[in-house]
Every structure is written in C-alpha cells, then in structure tokens.
C-alpha cells in the first residue's frame, strides 16, 4: 500500500516539469499565431504592429518556462527521456520556428525590395535549420547528471531566440516611444531611424545566430550557476537590482543582456586566440 502511494506521488511530481515544458511550447505556438494575424497596408506597412510585440514577449515567456522545467525535473528526481524529448520539441517551436517567423514578418514591415524579402526568408530558414541541428546535437550529447548542465557547447537556442525577440522589442520601442530616451545629445529622430533600421539587419543577425548555435563556442549555463551559488545574499541582491533595471527600460535592458551574452562566446574565443601564441611560446621555453 505504501509503495503504491509513493509511486502515485512520483507520477504526480513527474507531471509538474512536463506541464512547465508544455507551457514553453504553447507560448511558442501563441507567438506564431500572433505573427500569422499580422495585417499589412497597401505600402507593405503593418497595421497591427502590437502583434509583433506580443509575439516577442511570448517568446520571452517561453524562455522562463524553459529555464525551470529541467531544474524542477532534477529537483523532484523525475528526469526522464520523455521529458527531454518533450523539451526539445517545445524548444523547436518556441526558439526555432517562432523567432524565424518573427524575423521574416518584422522585415516585411518595411517596404523592402523583393530580393531583400527573399533574403529575409532564406536566412530565417537557415536560423530554423541551425536551431534544429543545435537541439539534435544537444540531445545526443546531453546527460541527466547535474554537472552536465553547467555550460553549453554553442549558443543555446533560447538565448538566440531571446536575442531576436529583444531586438524586435527594441525596434518597436524606438519607433514608438523613443521620446522617453530623448536626450540633448541623442535626437529622437536618430533613435527612430535606429528602430526602423533593426528589421533590415535582423535577417543577417539571424544567420549569424544560426552559426553560433551549431558552433563549439563555450557558453555558461546562467540559471544553473545562479542556483548553485552558495551566497544567498548575493543572489537576492542580484535579483533585486536586475528587476529594477529591467522594469525601468525592459526593451533596452533585455536587448543589452541578450546581445551581451551572445557576444560572450566569440569574445572568449578571440581572447584565447590572441593570447595563444604567448602561451605556446612559454610552453616551448619550459620544455626546452
């Protein structure tokens, strides 16, 4: 009887991380639905641009679900192959397909040339392919052990999706609310121009993100390292100040955070390449 109760309790606990994972996939699907509901005017301008904002925030919400489903599964000791496969399928929707559609549709906001429109779609497809390959490789190399979740080989697909979503949010913010950032040395018209330029460069950024996802550049697992920290006061302080800055200007701060994290891998690799010759010389001198 006692064994049956324990088994039932374990089954109930196993549902929790899977439900969180499904929340991830549902947010991704919701983002795609919002993008499919975009309406365009005669000149190619978008008539309900708020749908771009909703889609970007849904991708952000999917990231929140994705950040905690694996952690909850390991804490409740209910990690399973089923949960891993479910997580990958949800990630493909939320961090593969949804961001790619966001890139293509936000580019359609501008009255661009047919050629650049094709480029946007082709680069969006490249992003989807990169995300699928990244997730497939992660599944093959992934381990249920906690120590295997301290870092990534290649840019994680949620971070790539977050970079795209945050750039779209920044673009919409600068086009509509740039006066909030207006300073004497930054005319609001310049900020508007930057906001309008982002959709043009977004397909190129998506292509670069596709490469970073399939690369072997090292990236830290921020959530795991945060929870493994033994200093609770530092954690609390970091959360408070992060929330303050994000609440002040969420579009700007999120974009800075995601772009900074994305550049972390190439910067570390560049640093290694710059200092590698000196290290090799020292090693050769030591051996001789």
Image (cartoon, rainbow, N blue to C red):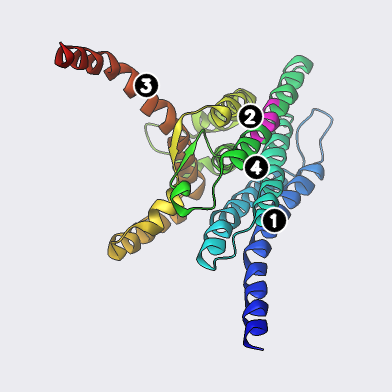
Q: Position of residue 249 (x, y in %)?
A: 46, 49
Of the two numbered discs 1 and 2 on the same chain, state the one appearing first in sequence: 1
Q: Position of residue 75 (x, y in %)?
A: 50, 65
Assess disc 1: are there few (<14), some (14-19) or many (≥20) residues with their C-alpha within 10 Å of its C-alpha. few
Q: Which mark is residue 199?
A: 2
The image shows residue 103, relative to residue 280, as above or below, that is below
Give the residue pinned by disc 4. 95
Q: Which residue is mark 1?
A: 82
- Residue 192 lies in quadrant: top right
Does the magenta portion include 129? Answer: yes
- Mark 2 and mark 4 lie on one chain; the one further toward the N terminus is 4
User: Label 3, on which residue?
Assistant: 270
SS at mark 1 in the image = helix
Label 1 or label 3, whichever lies nearer to me, is 1
In the image, residue 157 sits, relative to residue 63, either above or below, namely above
Nearer the observer, 108 or 157: 157
Measured in 3D between alpha carbons, the distance from the residue under mark 2 to the one under mark 3, in whole angstroms, is 28 Å
Task: Quadrant for residue 175, please give it.
Answer: top right
User: Mark 1 against mark 4, which lies toward the viewer?
Assistant: 1
The residue tagged with tag 4: helix, strand or loop? helix
Q: Residues within 10 Å of mark 3 (few under 14, many from 20)?
A: few
């Amino acid at each position: 009887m006692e064994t049956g109760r324990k088994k039932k309790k374990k089954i109930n606990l196993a549902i929790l991380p899977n439900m969180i994972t499904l929340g991830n996939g549902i947010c991704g699907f919701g983002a795609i639905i919002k993008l499919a509901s975009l309406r365009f005017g005669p000149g190619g301008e978008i008539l309900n641009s708020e749908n771009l904002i909703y889609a970007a925030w849904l991708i952000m919400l999917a990231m929140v679900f994705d950040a905690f489903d694996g952690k909850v599964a390991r804490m409740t000791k209910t990690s399973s192959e089923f949960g891993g496969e479910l997580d990958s399928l949800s990630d493909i929707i939320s961090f593969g397909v949804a961001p790619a559609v966001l890139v293509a549709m936000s580019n359609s906001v501008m009255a661009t040339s047919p050629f650049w429109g094709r480029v946007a779609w082709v680069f969006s497809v490249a992003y989807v392919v990169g995300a699928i390959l990244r997730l497939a490789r992660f599944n093959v190399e992934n381990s249920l052990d906690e120590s295997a979740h301290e870092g990534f080989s290649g840019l994680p697909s949620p971070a790539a999706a977050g970079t795209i979503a945050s750039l779209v949010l920044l673009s919409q913010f600068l086009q509509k609310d740039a006066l909030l950032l207006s300073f004497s040395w930054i005319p609001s018209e310049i900020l508007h121009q930057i906001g309008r330029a982002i959709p043009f460069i977004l397909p190129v950024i998506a292509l670069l993100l596709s490469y970073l996802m399939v690369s072997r550049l090292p990236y830290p697992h921020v959530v795991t390292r945060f929870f493994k920290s033994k200093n609770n006061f530092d954690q609390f302080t970091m959360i408070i100040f992060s929330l303050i800055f994000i609440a002040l200007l969420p579009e700007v701060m999120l974009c800075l955070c995601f772009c900074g994290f994305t550049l972390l891998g190439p910067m570390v690799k560049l640093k290694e390449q710059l200092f590698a010759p000196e290290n090799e010389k020292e090693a050769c001198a030591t051996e001789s």
